[in-house]
Amino acid sequence: MTQQVGSNAIGEQFDTSAPTPAAPGEVVAARAPEKMAANKIQCDACPVLCQISEGRLGACDRWGNFGGVLTRTDPVLLLERPGVELVPGTAQDWDGELLNNAPVFVSGVGSGTTYPDYKPAPFIVGSRHEGVDLVTVVTEGIFSYCSFKVKIDTDRFLGPEQATVRHRGEAVGHVTTIEYGSQFLSLGGVHHLTGGSKKEGRVTCELMMALGNRQPVELEIEGGAQLTVQAGCAPRINGVEEQRMRVGCGSATIGIFARQWFGHVDEVVVVDDHITGVLSEHQAGRCLDMPPSGIRIRGRKSTPGRYFQVASPGSGWGGTDIDDPLSIVEGWDPKVARPGLRLLMVSTTGEHAEWFELDVALRPQRAPMPAAVRKVVERIGENCEPALATVLFVGGAGGSLRAGVTENPVLLTRSIKDLLTNVTCGGAPAYVWPGGGITVMVDVTRMPANSFGSVPTPAIVAPIEFTMRREVYAALGGHVERVRPIEAVVASARHRIADALPSNPWPPAGVPKAGA
């Protein structure tokens, strides 16, 4: 019968030589099922427990049966430190001494997993940075409790808050709040992965892996828009690529550009779905001693010069449903307004702008926009940042991840909260949420390409690394006996090397020195 080798044994370390007998107490594979064919291997890298024939891959396409040995097919990704060249001979001729300021960092991409929970992490790496001995615990976590928060820069109406977001007909998330020119979506999560039908879980998992790997995905919002979203790219809303993120709300736009309009206009209305601004009534206009224009704006008046609910949400002017800006003007006070009064109506991005002058009947008539006014409108557009879709991975690092680091997982949690342990995802800096547990959030564009995988439980596979001083690792009850010098990893593990992003801090540099 083919020899069983667990995913925490030699196969995971990418050593293709024959497996050695397990040491007393060493974790290897679970007992093979009695009815499994003799030419198969049972993979224990995730709960699916695939039975893999010789030369074939498991359901995840990440583990295979090669020569009777369970082997991870992807090489582990090493990040090369910017500005430091890795000399191949250094690792091969390593004399056993730790090098200071190692030129590479072992990322979790391609490292393998810690399932079942009690196994030590695939790579527990010793290194030295600026004279400080460090340990980095490296793994690919199997995340059921995870999601993506997507920030879409747009003023256009995407859908009502709490509306269901669908992908290929399946519910995969919902619309959350609007945050100053951006609409947020929450996609994925354990309820969609495991709480619905099998198809919903499968489609959700496929969507999440595509989002994390910066691929375009098609979304449909119930009662709202159809979207194409890709991390780091402009979103497409109902087939139209978004260009600009607004400079501010209508009131803010008034405040920013009031002095530049002064002397060239008698009134400015900045149309906005949320807060429409009116210059002559606004505090900025009063500070400039602008006389009232007599304009009457539709909507609910807030503080002077600020109006709510002037129109319904939509894809027109300023995120409203209007195409004609005059539709929000209810009229003019004949005791205040006068023929010839100059009116500019503009949106919060400057994409929509029209110039009017009042006739003798106090009716606005379209007229050519003066060059000085046009210049300010163009400056609104100049101050609008390019519209992007931002994708943040949010994952809860639970049992298998923490047990892979230490036998007493709460000590790892405390170490992170005490800022003794630096958490990265594929070498990218991760924000750790306050409160209980280890909930990390990371921008996928700062992670290596194709960092995310999946297993058909369904769940997402994502890299995570914990770096700390060696004495801290020993104090939290870590698997010290599993620490391997980084030079030995480079020399023996099948790997590939990619340049670390210069914009990312070097992970070992984020570990505080003793007494810090």
Image (cartoon, helix red, strand yellow):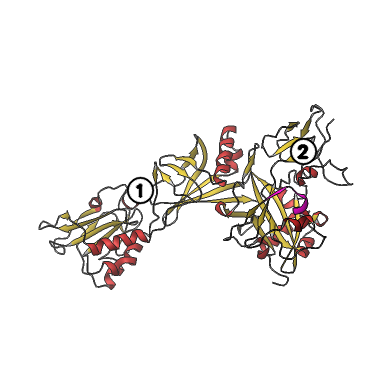
Looking at the rendered structure, the secondary structure element under dot 1 is loop
Q: Which residues are magenta?
A: 489-496
| Residue bearing mark 2 | 70
324 or 452, which lies in front? 452
Residue 448 appears in view: yes
The answer for how far apart the CA atoms under marks 2 and 1 are is 56 Å
Asked if residue 268 lies left or right of residue 414, the reply is left
Q: Amino acid at mark 1?
A: Pro
- Depth order, front residue of 498/141: 498
Give x and y (percent) for residue 318.
33, 53
- Name the element at disc 2: strand
The circle drawn on residue 244 is none
Residue at point 16%, 54% (across, down): 365
Q: Quickly name the residue at label 1.
A: 313
Badge nearest the viewer, 2 or 1: 2
Residue occupying the point 28% across, 73% down: 287
State the quadrant of the N terminus.
top right
Q: Position of residue 233 (x, y in %)?
A: 47, 49
Q: Amino acid at mark 2?
A: Leu
15 relative to 103 in the view: left or right: right
Residue lying farthest to the left in this orientation: 360
- Mark 2: few/some/many CA within 10 Å (<14, 14-19, 20+): many
- Determine whether, in the image, residue 103 is placed left or right of residue 96: left
Mark 2 / mark 1, whichever is N-terminal? 2
x then y, percent, for residue 190 = 60, 43
The local crowd at label 1, few if under 14, some if 14 to 19, many if 20 or more residues have their Cα within 10 Å, is many
